Image (cartoon, rainbow, N blue to C red):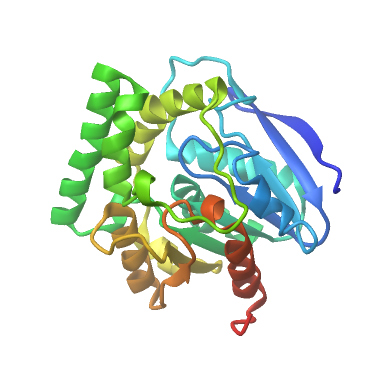
C-alpha cells in the first residue's frame, strides 16, 4: 500500500491540509462540493501508480482551518490556495482534475497561473459566467434557492434541491461492482454546511474573463458524466466550455459524482485524456 504523506500549508488567512501519494507527474485533484482530501480514495488508489496524486481540503472543510470564519470566501481565494499548493509540491507544470467547483478553481488557474498547469480536466464546472444571460439568470436562481432552503431548514433539506440542480438522482445512482459510497459523518455534515453557506455564494458571485480563458495555454478538457442530463446547470456549463474552446465534451462513466461511483472507469478515462491515448 502506498504511503500517504500529509502536510499543512499556511496560506493567507488559512491553513490548508493536503495529502500526497504515488509517483510520477503531479496530478492535483480539486474536489466538488463538500469533498475533502479523502473523498475519492478509490479513484486515487487507481491513479497513484502513474501519478503523484495531490488531494486537499479546501479552506473551511475538514482539517483546513480559516483564521476569520466571518470573512466571505471567493473563487479567486480558492484558486490562489490551489496556486500556492501547487507551488509547494512541484516546480513543473502539473495535471489537474477539477470536479464541479474544483473545475472552476482549475479554470481560474488556467487564466491566472497558466504556467502551473499542463492539462486541466474540467468535469461539469459550476460556472454561471459561462452561460448566456437567460440561462445564467435561471440557474443562479436555482443556486439561490438551494441556499434559502439551507438557511431556513438546514443542510439535509437543501440536498434535494441541490441534487436536482446538478442532475443527481440519489435513489438511482448505479455504481461499479464492489464500490460502496461513503456515509455522511459528522465531519462531512459540517462540510455540507460550509459548502452551502459559503461556497455556494462564491460560485454565484464568481466571474472570469472568457476571452482570457480561450487564450490560455493550458490544455483544458471539458468533461461531463454519461448520465448527467443535458438540460441541467453543470452539464450546460461543460457544453458551453467546449463551445468556447472549440472542442468536444469528454464523457465519463456515471454522472456528476462519477469519480465516486465509477472510480475504475473514471481513472481509465483520466489516464487516457492526460496521455492522449484515446484508445484506452
Asked which quadrant contains residue 266, the reply is bottom right
Q: Is residue 19 left or right of residue 171?
A: right
Asked which quadrant contains residue 264, the reply is bottom right
Q: Nearer the viewer, residue 105 or 185?
A: 185
State the image coordinates of residue 212 (x, y, percent, origin top left): 42, 62
Q: Is residue 146 left or right of residue 113?
A: left
State the image coordinates of residue 220 (x, y, percent, origin top left): 51, 67
| Depicted 41 relative to depicted 116: above or below | above
Q: Nearer the viewer, residue 130 or 264?
A: 264
State the image coordinates of residue 181 (x, y, percent, origin top left): 54, 43
| Depicted 245 relative to depicted 129: above or below | below
Residue plotted at (73% across, 53% down): 45
Residue plotted at (40% across, 72% down): 245
Please give the count of numbered marks on the rendered protein: 0
Image quadrant holding the C terminus, namely bottom right
Residue reaching furthest to the front: 177
State the image coordinates of residue 154 (x, y, percent, origin top left): 32, 20
| Depicted 177 relative to depicted 78: above or below | below
Q: Is residue 143 left or right of residue 52?
A: left
Residue plotted at (31% across, 66% down): 240
Residue reaching furthest to the bottom: 279
Amino acid at each position: 500500500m502506498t504511503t500517504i504523506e500529509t502536510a499543512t500549508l499556511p496560506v493567507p488567512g488559512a491553513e490548508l491540509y493536503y495529502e500526497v501519494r504515488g509517483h510520477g507527474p503531479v496530478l492535483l485533484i480539486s474536489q466538488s462540493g463538500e469533498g475533502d482530501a479523502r473523498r475519492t480514495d478509490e479513484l486515487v488508489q487507481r491513479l497513484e501508480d502513474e501519478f503523484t496524486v495531490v488531494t486537499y481540503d479546501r479552506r473551511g472543510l475538514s482539517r483546513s482551518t480559516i483564521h476569520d470564519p466571518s470573512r466571505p470566501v471567493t473563487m479567486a481565494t480558492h484558486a490562489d490556495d490551489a496556486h500556492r499548493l501547487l507551488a509547494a509540491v512541484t516546480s513543473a507544470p502539473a495535471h489537474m482534475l477539477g470536479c464541479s467547483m474544483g473545475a472552476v478553481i482549475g479554470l481560474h488557474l488556467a487564466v491566472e497561473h497558466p504556467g502551473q498547469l499542463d492539462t486541466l480536466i474540467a468535469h461539469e464546472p459550476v460556472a454561471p459566467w459561462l452561460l448566456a444571460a437567460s440561462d445564467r439568470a435561471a440557474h443562479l436562481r436555482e443556486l439561490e434557492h438551494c441556499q434559502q432552503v439551507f438557511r431556513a431548514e438546514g443542510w439535509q433539506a437543501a440536498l434535494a434541491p441541490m441534487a436536482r440542480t446538478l442532475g443527481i438522482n440519489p435513489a438511482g445512482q448505479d455504481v461499479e461492482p464492489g464500490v460502496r459510497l461513503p456515509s455522511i459523518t459528522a465531519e462531512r455534515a459540517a462540510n455540507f454546511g460550509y459548502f452551502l453557506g459559503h461556497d455556494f455564494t462564491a460560485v454565484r458571485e464568481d466571474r472570469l474573463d472568457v476571452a482570457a480563458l480561450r487564450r490560455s495555454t493550458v490544455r483544458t478538457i471539458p468533461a461531463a458524466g454519461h448520465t448527467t442530463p443535458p438540460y441541467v446547470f453543470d452539464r450546460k456549463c461543460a457544453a458551453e466550455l467546449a463551445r468556447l474552446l472549440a472542442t468536444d465534451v469528454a464523457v465519463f462513466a456515471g454522472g456528476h459524482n462519477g469519480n465516486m461511483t465509477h472510480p475504475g472507469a473514471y481513472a481509465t478515462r483520466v489516464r487516457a485524456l492526460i496521455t492522449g491515448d484515446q484508445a484506452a
